[in-house]
Amino acid sequence: MATDTTTFVPPAPRPRRWGDLVFRNLTLVGALTITVLIILVGYQLFKGSHIAIQKFGWHFLFSSTWDPVQEQYGSLPFIYGTFVSSLIALLIAVPLGVGTAIYLTDLAPLWLRQPLASVIEMLAAVPSVIWGLWGIFVLVPWLRVHAYPLLQKTLGFLPIFQGPIYGIGMLTAGIIVAIMILPIVTSVSREVLRSVPNLQREAAYGLGATRWEVTRIAVLSYARRGLFGAAVLGLGRALGETMAVTMVIGNRPEIAKSLFAPGYSLASVIANEFTEATTDMYLSALFELGLVLLGLTIIINAVAYLMINAITSAETRRVA
């Protein structure tokens, strides 16, 4: 019996395609550029705030004094104002945005879905200063005369709804920011809900679920991670909002329990006082406020990323 002595010859490697190589390198450069830009911005803010960091150290984050005359600076009132106004905006915009996205995805008639979605997305094209002007001349008078007195009369036993009513204040700033981030939350939530496979809905209907049960069990549970991401995107926009907040928040560097009281935010104080900084220490303190705002944004996004991973891991373990 003859033995086959033919040796195996491996196939020649495929030639590298120049188009793939160029595309890969271009995308790599784009990704690295974003990283380098963030590092450069952080470095420039750190460099500009070096004087204030040396003088105040960590005390800058926990001090409530902002006195350019005595050159005593603290960022706590501005951090408080940024967090409170952003939290109010999220509490208003996320339920409205997700509810609108659910309606546009599963409940609205086909002829109404795209026109209504286009109108909502057009809100994102309105400049921030226009929202600020509308807030000053329309929203603030209405809130001061009608909404806030009714709110105080109904929920006045709570400390956050006590005190004099000015119209401008933390709650007004939160409402303005909520209107501004609503298109982002709605658009992202809508795309997330549209990505849910129809098989999920059909299976739930096949088991006898009602429309609400289908939305709650088959749609929202499946899209929970993406909806959380939409809320994080809205929070990122809320933290850095400047002009509209500056025009309606009241610009008073103090920490007040009442949401009716004026406040200040990190972005607002930088925009208001940067041109007034006549000393190196004053300018350095404003740079440090910018560094704090950048750090808060990065930390919040990192925490949100970890929470998303935790949710995903829990869902994977439950399925397994």
Image (tube, rainbow, N blue to C red):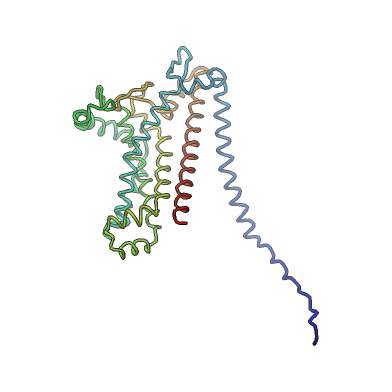
Using residue 195 as the reference point, say whether residue 5 is left or right of it.
right
Residue found at the very far bottom of the displayed protein: 1
Residue 65, given in percent of the width and then of the height, sits at: 43, 17
Can you say whether 274 is above or below 305 in the image?
Answer: above
Which residue lies at the image location 40% right of the left edge and 37% below the top edge?
Answer: 238
How many dots with numbers? 0
Q: Nearer the viewer, residue 244 or 233?
A: 233
Which residue lies at the image location 60% right of the left edge and 50% below the top edge?
Answer: 28
Write down the quadrant of residue 149 in the picture. Answer: top left
Locate the N terminus and report the quarter of the image it occupies: bottom right
Using residue 106 as the reference point, say whether residue 222 is left or right of it.
right
Using residue 298 as the reference point, say whether residue 181 is left or right of it.
left
Can you say whether 143 is above or below 2 in the image?
Answer: above
Residue 303, given in percent of the width and then of the height, sits at: 48, 39
Residue 268, given in percent of the width and then of the height, sits at: 41, 28
Which residue lies at the image location 47% right of the left edge and 15% below the top edge?
Answer: 72
Residue 97, given in percent of the width and then of the height, sits at: 33, 46
Residue found at the very far top of the displayed protein: 70
Write down the quadrant of residue 164 in the picture. Answer: top left
Q: Nearer the viewer, residue 101 or 51?
A: 101
Can you say whether 221 is above or below 162 in the image?
Answer: below
Can you say whether 18 is above or below 26 in the image?
Answer: below
Write down the quadrant of residue 20 in the picture. Answer: bottom right
